[in-house]
Each structure stands twice: as structure tokens, then as C-alpha cells.
Amino acid sequence: MDRNNLITLAVGGKINEEANIRDKQSTIVNARIETVWSVLTDISTWPVWNQDITAVSEKQITEGLHFNWSMSSVSCQATIQKVQFERLISWTGVEGGKKIIQVWKLTPSDGNQTIITCEKSIEGFRSLFYSPQKLHSTLLNWLARLKQCAESNIT
């Protein structure tokens, strides 16, 4: 899929359902949506609550923002495509020759809880060397760590 189509999907809050690697995971966070949103959108604190992330540019999320971040030994160049306050963040990126869409969706639940869903699609020749199980584990780790941070307010 070309870059413009990836951007169109991300702006619509969608991943590429035809990508050879994709996953979707959700969790319930025992924190208000404002708290979860604050943790998720402060990019500079990602390495604090997600130790798999080794470096990140120090910026707040806004549409059109270009930022770089590293996870383990892989660096990603990303662009925020859509921000709906306290509801959705989507970005597209290039990571080691792979084209990526990642979408975060937040839904308030029972006043003091938030349902957070993370979806990600990975495509391109280099995605042949990336397993669906690795993506699955990565998304579960992101969600678990975000949940822990938001519930304990460690940032």
C-alpha cells in the first residue's frame, strides 16, 4: 500500500486490515480517561513507563508532529495523523523498512475506568522477518504498562 493510502486509513482511525502483520488488543484501566490520555500523549515519558522504549523525542502529541523513537535496537520515524482529544491517536511510521499504522482508541467506562484499544498493522518486505506473535506480545506489554502507569500515576 502506498503512503497516501496509509495516511488515509490512519486519519480515519483504521489500520491496514490487508497487511500481513496486524493485531488488536484492549484492556480496562482503572483510571479516568483524562489520566490515561495524559499518560499516553506525553511522548517524553514513554521510556519511563515502558522500559522497552529506549529513546523518544520530547514532544506532546499534535496532528502532523514528526517524531522519532526507539524500541530495543529498532528506530521508528513516525507522524501523528489524527488526534481526537481523549478519544483517538493514530500515527504512521517507517521502522526498519516496514510501513506501520498504529491506532490508540480510548472509551470512558463506568466513570472511573477507561477501555483502551491499540491496533497496529505492519507491511512491506521487511515485515516478512517480523512475527505476528511478536506484535501481539508488544501490544499486550504496551497496554499493561500504560495501565500500570495510569493507575498508579507514576509520571
Image (spheres, rainbow, N blue to C red):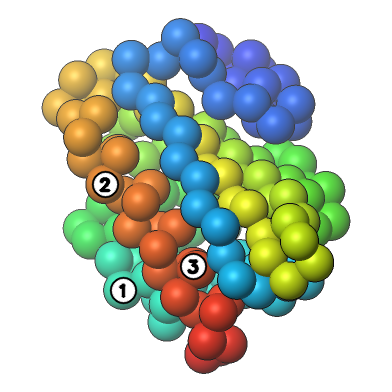
Q: Please tell me how crowded label 3 is: few (under 14), some (14-19), or many (20+) other residues with Cα within 10 Å.
A: many
Q: Please tell me how crowded label 2 is: few (under 14), some (14-19), or many (20+) other residues with Cα within 10 Å.
A: few
- Determine the residue positioned at 45% across, 75% down: 148
Q: Please tell me how crowded label 1 is: few (under 14), some (14-19), or many (20+) other residues with Cα within 10 Å.
A: some
Task: Say which of 93 and 18 sits in front.
Answer: 18
Q: Is residue 44 left or right of residue 138?
A: right
The amino acid marked with disc number 1 is Gln
The amino acid marked with disc number 2 is Ser
- Determine the residue positioned at 57% across, 45% down: 117
Q: Secondary structure at mark 2?
A: helix
- Mark 3 or mark 1: which comes first in sequence? 1
Residue 113 position by quadrant: bottom right
- Mark 3 or mark 2: which comes first in sequence? 2
**Hey, which residue is sitting farthest front in the picture?**
110
Q: Establish if 28 lies above or below 56.
A: above
Label annotation for residue 146:
3
Residue 121 position by quadrant: top left
Q: Are marks 3 and 2 in contact (CB under 8 Å)?
A: no
Residue under circle 2? 137
Q: Are marks 3 and 1 in contact (CB under 8 Å)?
A: no
Residue 79 seen anywhere in this rendered image of the structure:
no
Q: Establish if 125 lies above or below 29.
A: above
Q: Is residue 9 left or right of residue 86?
A: left
Q: Secondary structure at mark 3?
A: helix
Q: How far from the left and from the top, in percent, is residue 38?
A: 70, 73
Q: Nearer the viewer, mark 2 or mark 1?
A: 2
Q: How far from the left and from the top, in percent, is residue 27?
A: 50, 53
- Mark 2 or mark 1: which comes first in sequence? 1
Residue under circle 1? 51
The amino acid marked with disc number 3 is Leu
